[in-house]
Amino acid sequence: MKLICIGRNYAQHIEELQNERPDEPVVFLKPDSAILLKQHPFVIPEFSSDIHHEIELVVKISKVGKYIEPKFAHKYYEELTVGIDFTARDLQQRLKDKGLPWEKAKAFDGSAVIGDFISKKVFSSVESLNFELRKNGEAVQKGNSSLMLWTIDELISHVSQYFTLKIGDLIFTGTPAGVAAVKPNDILEGYLQDNKLFRINVK
Ligand code: MG
């Protein structure tokens, strides 16, 4: 399975990092070795001194597809969760400055936190889902899917032009504003609407 990640999908987050607003989705991949195993702490890697949390809605693909039209994209996923796209911001900046790929800063071991999945049927609409990251009990990132520049269906359609989507593939749909560094002993909790879907310790 693969993790397909979207960058720059929320206007306020684009502003906070002073990035350009893209005219099509920014896409990168993480390997399955990036998944933080359940019940494991996130260990800050030695190659970075500025690891940022990025809370994101995550969609699990339930059907094989390629060249999926937006109007049919809803048929390709049944479950959602929230996750973290951990990012070594210092390393990413150095790579961006040189125009190099981001993988070392984005796809390292443990960089993908995945919460417990919930059926999308639980929600009246996926177009207006609140989600939130709490750090040590305090809300530090709040998002709503209505603020995405590209909707879930548009993202599924877009990425399926390049990558065949397979059952179990995950799409990280981009982070809202409020990204910041984590430090040892932080406790990070992810919420989708009122559901707490992960809790991890930072070491
Ligand atoms: Mg991200």
Image (cartoon, grey):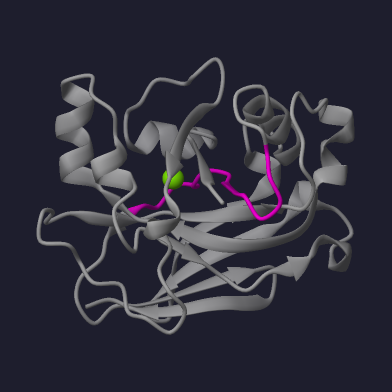
> For the stretch drawn in magenta, what is the main secondary structure?
loop
Res. 51 image quadrant: bottom left
Question: Residue 95 at what x, y percent from top left?
Answer: 19, 30
Give the left or right position of residue 133, taking residue 88 as reference: right
Q: Residue at x 37, y 81 (%)?
A: 40
73 in the magenta segment: no
Q: How many numbered discs sit on the rendered protein?
A: 0
Residue drawn at x 76%, y 42% is 64
Query: What residue appears at the point 48 percent right and 66 percent down from the top-left corner?
Result: 133
* Quarter location, residue 150: top right
Q: Is residue 192 above or below residue 10?
A: below
Q: Is residue 179 above or below residue 116?
A: above
Q: Quadrant of the C terminus?
A: bottom left
Q: Is residue 48 left or right of residue 99?
A: left
Q: Residue at x 71, y 51 (%)?
A: 167
Q: State which region is magenta.
A: 165-179
Measuring from the top left, give residue 80's x and y in whole percent: 70, 60
Task: Confirm whether the magenta stretch covers residue 173.
Answer: yes
From the viewer's side, name the closer residue of 15 and 145. Answer: 145
Judged from the image, the quadrant occupied by ligand 1 is: top left
The residue at the far top in this view is: 23
Residue 101 percent coordinates (x, y): 28, 28
Lateral position of residue 59 relative to residue 87, left or right: right
